[in-house]
Amino acid sequence: MSKVLLASQNAIKLEEVRSVFPEIDVLRTDLLEVQEVDVRRVVEHKLEQVAALCLPVPVIVEDTGLAVEAWNGLPGALVKWFVEGVGAQRLKELFHGPEPVTAVATSAVGVVFDGEREIWEGHAEGRLVDGRGLLGGWTPVFEVRGTGRTLGEMGFEERMRWTMRREPLLAAREWIAGRQPAAAAGSCVEEAPRA
């Protein structure tokens, strides 16, 4: 497979993407992130920005969200800001009661290549628990259903088995492999010079 770029500098994301795309390089660009609960909409917005760069290689963008059932799907893609504001443990503590706090982790992976765009989603069901593990973000408080372990305490190989990113990344790899760049100059049209 030819060169592929990832429009992110997040170390956890890069490690997981690299397990599916060993040849991945980082596209060092600042993308504006629309404030949305739906991860798919966040990725659509990022893809628009990447498409405007008119790069001749496939570019992957990704975003995650954590939908808490008790909050009707919040914080969703805003989870990063919740964790930065109050911390992962405090996020878990916001929920009181005898019932487990169920949640769904979602990853949306998008690719822009040769004028085409596609998005895939993956999900992991689980619950919020007291923090366990050293991985960053909200991973220490998200216990994956059926494992008894949080994403934050799993080793890399185990995490790749359960991560919500795995399936959409595999779908993106297959999609990219089935595409050949156009023989023409590219998919972007340059503006005509002004008189």
Image (cartoon, rainbow, N blue to C red):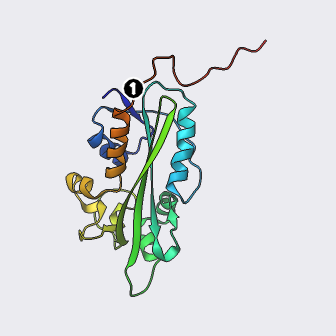
Q: Residue type at mark 1?
A: Gln
Secondary structure beneath dot 1 equals loop
Residue farthest along the bottom direction in this orientation: 98
Mark 1 lies on residue: 180
Say above or below: 77 vs 4.
below
Q: Residue furthest top?
A: 195
Position of the N terminus by quadrant: top left
| Residue 132 left/right relative to 119 | left
Residue occupying the point 57% across, 45% down: 45
91 on left or right of 165: right
- Closest to the observer, 190 or 174: 174
**What is the residue that sits farthest to the right in this orientation?**
195
Quarter assignment of residue 195: top right
Which quadrant of the view contains residue 14? Answer: top left
Measured from the top left, where is residue 115 in percent x and y? 52, 31
Q: How many marks?
A: 1
Task: Kindly identify the residue that appears in the image at 30 percent across and 44 percent down.
Answer: 15
Q: Is residue 64 left or right of residue 164?
A: right
Residue 37 point in image, percent of width and height? 55, 60
Which residue is drawn at the image coordinates 35% and 45% (left, top)? 171
Point 43% across, 76% down: residue:
93
Circle 1 packing at 10 Å, graded few (<14), some (14-19), many (20+), is few
